[in-house]
Image: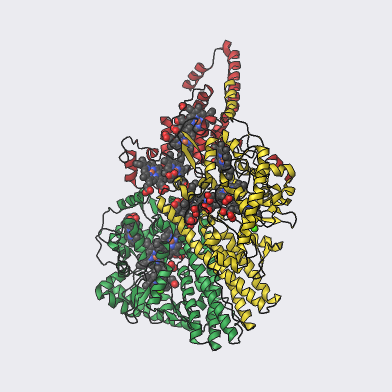
Chain colours: A yellow, B green, C red
Amino acid sequence: ASNIIERRTEAKLVQQVVTPINEWEPRNEIWGQNYPREFETYKNTLDTSFASKHGGSANVDMLARYPNLVMLWAGYAFSRDYNQGRGHYWAVNDVRKTLRTDIPQPSTCWSCKSTDVPRMMNKIGIANFYKAPWKELGSEIVNPIGCQDCHDPKSMNLRITRPALVEAFQRQGKDIAKSTHQEMRSLVCAQCHVEYYFKGKEDKYLTFPWDKGFSVEDAEKYYDEIDHVDWLHPISKTPMLKAQHPDYELFKMGIHNERGVSCADCHMPYKSQGNVKFTDHKIQSPLANIAGSCMVCHRVKETELLKNVYDRQDKVLELSGIATNNLVKAHLYAKACWDAGASEEQMKPVLKLIRHSQWRWDFVAASHGGSFHAPLECARILGTSIEKSLEAVGLEMEILAKLGKQPPVIPDISTKDKAQQFIGLDMPKLFQTKQEFINTILPQWDKTAEERQGKMNQDYKK
Amino acid sequence: ASNIIERRTEAKLVQQVVTPINEWEPRNEIWGQNYPREFETYKNTLDTSFASKHGGSANVDMLARYPNLVMLWAGYAFSRDYNQGRGHYWAVNDVRKTLRTDIPQPSTCWSCKSTDVPRMMNKIGIANFYKAPWKELGSEIVNPIGCQDCHDPKSMNLRITRPALVEAFQRQGKDIAKSTHQEMRSLVCAQCHVEYYFKGKEDKYLTFPWDKGFSVEDAEKYYDEIDHVDWLHPISKTPMLKAQHPDYELFKMGIHNERGVSCADCHMPYKSQGNVKFTDHKIQSPLANIAGSCMVCHRVKETELLKNVYDRQDKVLELSGIATNNLVKAHLYAKACWDAGASEEQMKPVLKLIRHSQWRWDFVAASHGGSFHAPLECARILGTSIEKSLEAVGLEMEILAKLGKQPPVIPDISTKDKAQQFIGLDMPKLFQTKQEFINTILPQWDKTAEERQGKMNQDYKK
Amino acid sequence: MRTIKKIFSVIIPPDKWKVPVIVALGVITGLAFFLFRISNADSYLSDKPETCINCHVMYSQYDSWQHSSHARVATCNDCHVPHDNIFHKYLFKAQDGLRHSTIFTLRTEPQVIRIKEAGRDVVQENCERCHGDFLAYHETFVAIRDGEVGNEDNEGLCWDCHKETPHGKVNSLSSAPNAQVPKQLSPIVPEWIQKIIK
Ligand SMILES: [Ca+2]
Ligand SMILES: [Ca+2]
């Protein structure tokens, strides 16, 4: 018996760490000393060489690929600069360098970018963290997304480190602490890959709009009830909503979720290296490793699986294209209506249609994985988006005709440049401001940070 | 996987015949003497007790369920009477009794209803068969869909007995005789469960519009190029297309087809009776036997699989509902435009949009299995249908406004009765004419047939 | 009747041994219960994978199973115990459990654990149990059982071919050094968040 007791305690020692990890340790390099395989693969998220038809790690300028977007987001920071996400190692670099952080932003923008976030939230308090101007914490938030965000340093358990997710569950009446192991393998991702908004004019408190459910209609109702407006569209004067990467929400509507498959199953496949098996931490498009991810469950040819993914994405993108064309029209015709002297009363139903139509389209477009994760739900949503924008256009044509006007001609916005010019952005100036910030402020931030924690791994700055 | 499944089914066909079967034998009872299990299950297609949420064998009056259809098919026989298909044993009964055969129809209408069809085609020639008035062959075509349609009487091999399918393959440059066994398990169904039209004003030659491919756009292009018009819509004056049950075509766009699953895998599952395994010939909704069909491949709970099917159907039907509402509008607004004095020139783009929009919607709606067989493709098609009808409505509103008119109010067509009244159908009269036909003509047909082949199994007349 | 008496006469010890025997039996029973408890032997009666990872030597199998296509559809016992009838199931479990815990306690487990013949047959039967429909084509099935398909050392076991199903090609006590096992999963929400929220 003593033998058994002895052996049971031994079990806990098997997973012993080489260097104990400090509770708030943000540096991935330090965690990596204990877990070299996971760290090495994690570091490989620096690699930007893989590009698939619609995704991948390459730095894709989405505004250049789909110039319509500039029009749809006119008056909002996204019309300046919007790229497809790339590897986690780039997160801090990219939020520093995007033109979207030149307008004053709260620290909420740091929330999903760094392992320093839990440390600082604990230090200054969650509400204070969000409230702080983004630039204020620049020297504190320097280590990109990493181990601390998903793991408990003592047990290496998966855990939730972002309060917004815990709070969203709580408001739904669910206790996230009761999640199963398999659920956790998706929930760690749901800390960030979700639609969000900043609650409160001053508070900027990071909030997920899930109180009524996960569907696009549920969130729409949520926002409508609290009259939330992300920005006023300068062309059509619509009180707009912006959707951001609802990957978790859409994933929940798809067959893989219904069959209990988790994000990690596809994006972090199991891997053998010599005689050891571990989880691949090069989180990326599964298309870069179909054999390791999909083929665990699907024993069909790689080319067939690739075709499955592209087929689904292509069909969804076809509808998304239709939706954006009609939304552009709806915004421009609305302007023509206002110019022709339409009344608030006349325009009210039009603006509501535009708000809802663009929200629904954006919900699909902002989720780069959605067109594979839940293709049918995406197509359904886009179908309703198309209906709403075209209803708006119909009403607008009627209003214009009544006011004795012709519908306006759609300007040439066939490239990003032309579109940005049309909405009046002075891009050279924006680039210059950013460059100054990069040359003067960033070195200061890094210097302060290095004094605090030692030299950082600077690879991602290249 | 498909390889192994294929081999397994090949084995079954090595069997022996008790009573040799005549080459043109149309009577299922005679075939059944050799194959009692297949015959018994086949005969059970008489059973109309199973109804699922959107399908099943129950006699569902589709015009009552979706009164909008009456409007969309105004001026065409389908606005009188359109039911969801039921078991194969009902085929002759239902084509005899539908109000659609009161207008003069060619014998092409018999093509997919009876085992007497190959016999008669052989006797009088294919072209002559189609050309003959439908009523002319009434006493020859009496045995419902059965063994002769799919099997070779000597070997019991699956075979193709309908020329239209062979010809369609030929025009595509493919040789149907080279099909694999597994493909045959779908191709026997593709003889009938496909979109078709009658080629030639006089010839009425049964033709599948596949020359450019299987997609809805391919067929649309095909019809546009030959300026095919099924009927002129009396309300909007649109030269319309009618889609009929493109189940095979849509199925080809779905994942099950891509993974080599055949119609028979789900609709004719393998069955054990005592120690004998055979193919269930009670062809019906697989939802009546989820354990026997789906669960061969999917080891999840029946309730979950049922939910999967309903989820997909519900999402597709949501878009289909949007499409029909807008199509009703488009037709009525078009009429208002004409009434207000719109010119042919003005209306041309509008009518083209209506033609294409309704064609696409119908392609999805006419396929009762499509919303499960290929849900994403259905949603994609409906998305484009919605765009086109609403573009038409937009143009119409503009035309109306220019002509100084208000858009018309949509009348109350919320029930089948109201809708049929609105489009000017005298239903009591139609029913009466049919009843006379049933009382006078049908007994003659049956008598002549009995003299030829002996007493028929009359169960389905009840 | 007579035979029963005979048996009793063999089992029942002579009078003078009665007290020591009762004491001894009591001690053994007590020890057995004690062993039963501390070795979590009762867990052997459950079907949850968590019960297998009461022993850390099972972690690597747990880990590979958790990442396999079967993790969502079959637990350890779906494969590793007989499902032909309930008595057989628990008898097999008891035997297995006893041997595993003995070996575990005596620290004689090998670095590379290999499945035993009895266990092997059970697993094979279970593959067939679930995939029976797929194997409805008798000839395919016979060909597999007879080792007619595949390479030369095909023993007719499913995993001669499906080697990755479910534990993968690499297996040893240290093949998954940092396996995450659900027993250790709490707390999912660290204290600092819990505090601020409540
Ligand atoms: Ca948002
Ligand atoms: Ca047709």
Identity of the residue furthest to the bottom in this view: B341
Q: Is residue A127 left or right of residue B424?
A: right
Near-viewer residue (B189 or A351): A351
Please tell me in which quadrant of the rendered image residue A4 appears.
top right
Residue A425: x and y in percent read 62, 65
- B85, above or below A24, in the image: below
Identity of the residue furthest to the top in this view: C16
Near-viewer residue (B192 or A347): A347
Residue at (32, 70) in percent of width and height = B164
Q: Is residue B190 left or right of residue B387?
A: left
Residue A25: x and y in percent read 65, 37
Please tell me in which quadrant of the rendered image residue B231 appears.
bottom left
Near-viewer residue (A263 or A402): A402
Please tell me in which quadrant of the rendered image residue B263 appears.
bottom left
Number of numbered callouts drawn: 0
Residue B157 visible, this orientation: yes
Near-viewer residue (C186 or A415): A415
Residue C96 visible, this orientation: no
Residue A2: x and y in percent read 59, 20
- B285, above or below C116, in the image: below
Name the quadrant of the C terminus of chain B: bottom left
Residue A234: x and y in percent read 66, 68
- A172, above or below B112, in the image: above
